[in-house]
Image (cartoon, helix red, strand yellow):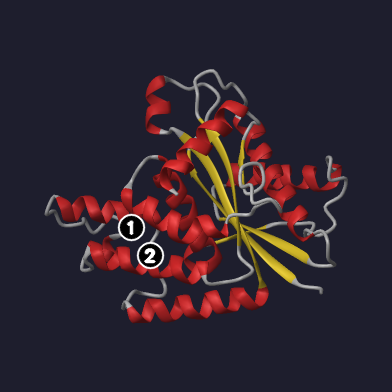
Amino acid sequence: MIETFFAFSDETGNYKREKSQNFCRKNPYYIRGGFIITVPDWRILKDKAQALLEDFNLPKDKELKWSYLWSVFKYKRNNKNIPEYKPYHFLADYSFDVLKEFVKEMFKLYASLDSVKTIYTFTKNQEKLRISESALVKMHLQELMQRIEMEIQTSESMATLAFDETDGAKKDKIRRAYCDIYNSGDFIAKYTHIKDSMSFELSHQSVGIKMADYICGAFRGCLQGFNYSKEVFASFVYPKVRRSKEGELLGYGIREVPKNEAVRGWLREKLRSVI
């Protein structure tokens, strides 16, 4: 059966080659999250997400980002008004519980779609890790592309990849890395099931990028021990993570970058404590 897939990806956290203890404490991880979805399921996701915005009376021309959720929480907790210059000021009149419920409903919708497969690439920031930022971005991208290719390579299907819009310098790094990986190949040999050029999309206009933002945020928050993140990840994201035929996630749907058995063991224990 020939199918067309969309793949959407976003990132959370920061990375740089020279890292202080303070940087690692504030940025414990760099994560790229993504998912693949068939076109028919994407239409369902798009239409039902629009309906949810209407149900919760949220504006369709603005985006409730994962980070905005927690910024709103801090202002509400401290009984402070959100300043007008903040990009999430449009959420000032919504209660935190209502916003949390909207995000949970988005996760429920995501989990209900049969074709969805989630993929994470993960770097645990350590002072001794001295890979350049450009090299690390490329490594994350390659791991993502490999898993998308392997997921759909048994058919004549094709996938097109979309990333969250970013600044010009980083966008150029991602574009060059994608082109190099696609044209040079690796152990996969050729990426015959992935479109030869990727794209960037504005998150407030793309339901796929919005959802990629949520799955990134939930995974990071889960690893950091936040209860709401653990709840939505365990209930709605974990069941959709790509697995081997034997049901193994690590290395298949969650890949540490660079490969490191100690980090993989750490991830395994973290997931066991949540699931």
- Residue at (31, 63) in percent of width and height: 100
Q: Residue furthest top?
A: 128
The residue singled out by tag 1 in the image is: 87
Q: Camera-side residue: 249 or 107?
A: 249
Image position of 17 with respect to 76: above or below: above
Q: Which residue is drawn at 32% across and 49% down?
A: 227
Residue furthest out toward the right: 189
Foreground tag (1 vs 2): 2
| Residue 88 position within the rendered picture, expressed as x and y whole percent measured from the top left | 31, 59
Q: In this orientation, does residue 112 appear?
A: yes
The answer to which of 4 and 138 lies nearer the viewer is 4
Q: Do the residues labelled 1 and 2 touch (CB within 8 Å)?
A: no
Label for residue 244? none
Type of amino acid under label 1: Pro
Marks 1 and 2 sit apart, C-alpha to C-alpha, by: 18 Å
Residue situated in front as seen by the camera: 232 or 38: 232
The local secondary structure at tag 1 comes to: loop
The residue wearing badge 2 is 103
State how many labels appear: 2
Q: Where is residue 28 in the image (x, y as percent from the top left)?
A: 44, 32
Instruction: Tell me if 59 is positioned left or right of 166 in this view.
Output: left
Label 1 vs 2, first from the N-terminus: 1
Q: Is residue 73 left or right of residue 245?
A: left
Amino acid marked by disc 2: Val
- Left or right, 28 with reference to 121: left
Q: Is residue 122 left or right of residue 77?
A: right
* Residue 130, x across and y down, in percent: 59, 21
Instruction: Pick the quarter of the image with the N terminus.
Output: bottom right
Residue 12 rendering spot, x and y as whole percentages: 48, 45
- When the figure is inspected, residue 42 is found, relative to residue 171, above or below; the finding is below
